[in-house]
Image: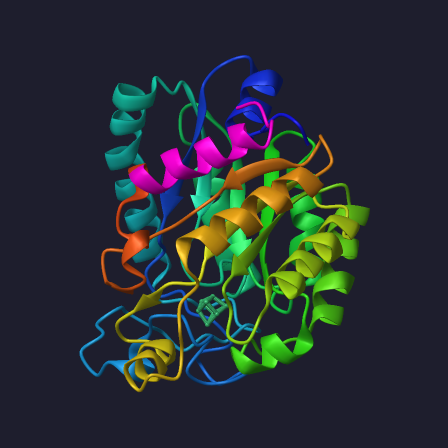
Amino acid sequence: MDRLYTFGKYLKKKFKTNVKKVPISIPGFTCPNIDGTVARGGCVFCENESFSPNFTKERFTLNLNSKENPLLQKQITALKEQFFNTVPLLKKYYGANKFIVYFQSFTNTYAPFETLKALYETALDFPDVIGLSIGTRTDSITDETLQYLEKLSKKHEIWVEYGIQSSNDETLQKINRGHDFQNVKETIKKTKDLGLNVCGHLIFGLPGETQKVMLKSVDDTIELNIDSIKFHPLYVTENTLLALEYKKGNFTPIDEQTYIDTLVKSIKKLPGHISVQRMTAGSENLLAPQWCKNKARQMSAIHRALRDEGIRL
Ligand code: SF4
């Protein structure tokens, strides 16, 4: 890639207007890697109640085979509130005219099918919504849900966002991911075979990974025929297993120079049709590394490094 092809550019080209994602966090949603279905405690970097007795995010016991969900009305109300509170800001600050509802927090296909259908269809009925982006794990999406999304994709812009993080199985074990890279390959193939758009997430700086291993993950991810990609550095937040390891001196976060160098090398590897949705990240509860605190500064350093390598922005 010699020109940074952002997701914003992709959307603008396709819809001829400013389109923005509206992030949504559905109360009551959890993750099979937290609730004991796959594992307990979640990925080492995931903030959840296992590491904080005071963590108050509401959970409910999912019964994936039941149509009963006592929280559904509450979830729909939260979806509406979050959407209608966020959209005016996106219009004001970004001049957005159309929207993609982004089911972001936890595992957004891990609920009874009827619940998912009700939430997705509510979102698609909002004004000026052109589609959905659904964040999930590759071991937590059923064929029924995929086929339903394929039907939706005939009329709407539908994206499935999978956390890949690394293609290295040893790393996936170390971070308590709960699935291997083979599972990632199989699920993404199935999703692509249905013609759905796929975005893959990768994390740089995972425990024990050298730059060579990180760049191998990029190559393996490109091989999956994805349509878009998100990169971010592994940062440490409170209420995570990683925070405990960091405080004991067992984990050293990636430094900014290595992160940016790995990112630039990764972007150079991307074929022109893969859009980039994210190049960095930070958190309000950040413990380390401190360079992740200031996103604006990070972005200008990344842009400078890309330009220095001859990549047009
Ligand atoms: S898959 Fe996501 S929600 Fe689940 S434990 Fe890992 S980071 Fe947390």
As drawn, 188 above or below 210: above
- In the image, residue 174 lies at what x, y percent? 55, 81
Q: Quadrant of residue 247?
A: bottom left
| Left or right, 119 with reference to 146 | left
* Front residue (pair 300, 29): 300
* Front residue (pair 49, 5): 5
- Secondary structure that dominates the magenta span: helix
As for residue 128 lying within the magenta part, the answer is no
Q: Residue at x 63, y 46 (%)?
A: 266
Is residue 264 among what the camera can see?
yes
Look at the image and name its color scheme.
rainbow
- For the N terminus, give its image quadrant: top right
- In the image, residue 36 lies at what x, y percent? 48, 85
Q: Quadrant of residue 272?
A: top right
Q: Residue at x 28, y 43 (%)?
A: 82
Q: Residue at x 65, y 80 (%)?
A: 170
Residue at the far top: name it: 16
- In the image, residue 295 lies at what x, y percent? 31, 43
* Front residue (pair 151, 253): 253
As drawn, 59 above or below 198: below
| Left or right, 67 with reference to 84 | right
As for residue 299 lying within the magenta part, the answer is yes
Q: Residue at x 59, y 81 (%)?
A: 173
| Left or right, 36 with reference to 180 | left
| Left or right, 162 with reference to 88 | right
Is residue 100 among what the camera can see?
no
Q: Which residues are magenta?
A: 297-313
- In the image, residue 87 lies at what x, y percent? 31, 29
